[in-house]
Structures are given as C-alpha cells and as structure tokens.
Image: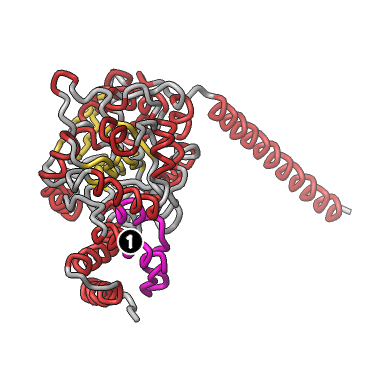
Amino acid sequence: MKRFKLINLFLILALLVGLLAACSGNEKSSKDSDSKDNNATSEPKSPEDFEGELTIWTFFGDVEKMGQKFEEKYPNVTVKVSVFPGDQYQTKLMNAINTKTDVPDIFDLERGYIDKFINQPFLANMSELGADELVENYVPYVKELGVADDNTIRAISDHSSPGAFWYHRDLAKEYLGTDDPEKVSEMVSSWDKIIELGKKVEEESNGDVHLISHFGDVFNTEAFNQEMWVQEDKLVIDPKWEDIFNNMKAIREEKVDAKLGYFSGGWGDALNDGGVILFANPAWAGFMVGNENGEAEGKYGLAKTPSGYYQGGTYRSIYNESDNKELAYEFVKFIASEEWQQYNLEETGNMPGLLSIYEKNMDSFTHPFFGDQKILKTYHDLVKEIPAQKATGNNQAISTLWYDAAAEAIDSGEDYEQALKDFKASVKNGYPKINVE
C-alpha cells in the first residue's frame, strides 16, 4: 500500500512539473509573440534617427549632388563622396577590395563592366535587405542589369538611359517636309525606310546633307535586342545579326551616312551645327550640345528609333563587409525613391528608373532643347521595348567584337561571311573557354 502511494506521489509530482513547464513555455511564447507584434507595429526609423558617416566611391561627379540631397533629408549623416577618373577607377576599387583597405560602403559600377562584378561575393545581397520591393516598379531592363545569376539584387541604378533619334528641326523641315515628331518617327520606323529616305536626302542636297551620321547607329540601336551570345558555354549567333550587317552595309554603300564616327569631333560639329539630320543618342547626351545664350533651345526634335535601345548606366552596390550596411541601404532606398528620381529628372534631364515617374511626367515634362515636345512619352514607349537581360556572360564585350569585325568588313568591301569569320576568331582568342563552332 505504501509503495502504491509512493508511485502515486511520483506521478503527481511529474504532472506538476510538466504543468509548470507548460505554463512557463506559454508565458515565454506569449512574451515572444508580444515582442514580435510590437516590432511589427513599431514605427519605422525616421531620417533623423540615422547617424554616422557614409563613404561612396564613384567616377561620376553628379554623385556629390546626390550625397548633398541625402544629407538634407538625413541631417545627422555625413556623406563622403570620392570621385576618381574613369580610367583609374576600376583598378583603384579592386585594389581596395582585394587588400580590404579603406573600402567604401557604397561603390558605383558602370554598365560597360558591371558584368565583372555582379556575381562577386563582395557585393551585398540587397534582396535580403528588401531591395526586391524597391525595384518592383522599375523599367525591366534597368532592374535586370542589377540582378546576379542567383536572382538576387546586387546593384541598383537611379536612372534609365534610353536612346532615340535627335533631329535638327530646320533640316527635317527642309529635307523631310516636316519637323513633327510623330510624322518623323513614322518616316524612320524601319531601316528600309531610313535607307530610302537617306538616298533622297543625299540626292536632293547634292551630298551636302546626310540623314544619319554613321552606320554604327544601326548597331547601337539593335545590339541588345538579340539573343545572348553565350548559352551553356557555347557561342550562339542570332540570325538577326546578318540583317544588322546588311543594313549597315547598305547605309554606307547608298551614301546615307556622313561617315562621322560616334562622339568624334566631326560628329559633335554636325550635332551642333548641322549637315546631318538624325543622331541616335542616349537621353544623357545633352552635355555634347553647346547652348550658349540659349542657342540650342527648341533646336531639336525627338523621334523613335526602329527598336528601343539604351546606352550606358551607372549602378550602386554595397560592400558586403561594410560595418555601415544599414545606413548604406538607406542611401540606396533614397536614390530608388520617387522623391529623388523626380528631382533628378527636373534638375538634370536624366530619365528615371521608376516607371511611375515616367507616367507622372509623360504629359507635362519638357526639355529646353526639344521645345514644347513632351519627350517622356517617346522615351517611355521605347524603354518598355528593351529586353530585360542580365549583365552577365560578357554579352556587351562580345557585341563589341562583332561590331569591330563588321565595321572592318564594310570598310574593306567584304561580305558578312568574312565578318563572321573574323568575329569568331576574336571570340576564340579573347574567350578560350567559350565553344565556338
């Protein structure tokens, strides 16, 4: 009997211990739940709550203005921007990263070489910080260029860089019969139309005026509208490249272009003074236009190119080992915001990365060079046509090899087969790991 009572006593004690443990667990769970609820409903940090110094490296002087605007909104933060010459920037940045010496919290990457960086472990994974939400309403191609192979956000730009035809209004009236942007856009909506129109301009002007500056405009506007060059380590040549070559060759043979290389001295003279009607230019090319005493105001019209295209672009990344990552991400959030991109559009004329800024300004924004034309509508239509492709795979560098081979063949009077042969040899030499048939 005593043994039975002792067993019962142990059972009662065991039940009491279990009950106390359960109560304790429930209490702890309740506290954790309350804590989570409090965190979920707590107010986000205000700009005044952020403190410290943020370091940024760039090759682009306008980032200093970006830093100033951030400081205005975040009064307890100092932004230290270091601007380096473009030809030295990559080397200096990589030396700092490799030695882990004075690496900035944020560094800029240019479209021309972002492919070398985008998958590197020293770029912070901004998707983990919430960046996917920042770029939900972005121009698709702008977003995708900042995405690594694992589909995480590693770089974000505050702008897009769409291109279009800038044209001299006076020459358009004289040789095209109109300077109306919609009518001009229709007249140059295909390369076949451009070639026929260019022949007419050359003939009527006795060779003094040309429709476009160089056959390179075909390449510039079509280069990112083809399949990716490298797929499963194999060189893939989209058949459309032959059409691009043939259009370039026809433009030269039919005397449609003025043979003025892009951004050359003669090209700049024609852009400012005439002699060429159309220029395939990115939206940021205004720095090439002389506007002393407002002489360029209303001088140009903006027409659509046969395909949507972009040129250039500056992206911002966060150093993965930065001790200042939270503040760095706050800066990235700022440049991805409507507030900054609206200001940037109005101050510099740089086209936004956010589609919402395009849409809000489509029926109102004008630029002095283009008079009363609502240029965002033109750029918006074109920018949405641009395929969203990752920056990986050396795609831009290989496209440059193709252009070099094509231009050499055209200048030498050779055909596409020769251009293709030279191109493949260049790819084999430059990228031995790529299988070239």
Residue 276: image x %, image y %? 22, 42
Residue 304: image x %, image y %? 39, 41
Observer-nearest of 163 and 268: 268
> In this orientation, does residue 375 appear?
yes
Q: Taking 138 as reference, is 224 above or below it? A: below
> In this orientation, does residue 432 appear?
no
Q: Could you tell me which residue is drawn at 81 percent across and 53 percent down?
A: 7
Residue 195: image x %, image y %? 33, 53
Q: Quadrant of residue 247?
A: bottom left
Q: Magenta part of the protein: which range?
A: 218-246
The amino acid on which the numbered mark 1 sits, given as a three-letter code, is Asn
Name the residue tied to disc 1.
395
The C terminus sits in image quarter: bottom left
Whether residue 372 sits left or right of residue 322 in the image: it is right
- Badge 1: how crowded within 10 Å, few (<14), some, or many (20+)? some
Q: Is residue 214 magenta?
A: no
Q: Quadrant of residue 181?
A: top left
Whether residue 182 sits left or right of residue 250 in the image: it is right
Q: Could you tell me which residue is drawn at 31 percent across and 27 percent down?
A: 370
- The residue at the far bottom in this view is 437
Q: Is residue 238 magenta?
A: yes
Whether residue 63 sits left or right of residue 143 in the image: it is left
Observer-nearest of 204 and 28: 204
Q: Could you tell me which residue is drawn at 44 percent across and 29 percent down?
A: 357
Element assignment for label 1: helix
Observer-nearest of 143 and 194: 194
Name the colouring of the figure: secondary structure
Observer-nearest of 127 and 209: 209
Q: Taking 196 as reference, is 323 above or below it? A: above
Whether residue 374 sits left or right of residue 408 in the image: it is right
The N terminus sits in image quarter: bottom right
Residue 16: image x %, image y %? 74, 42
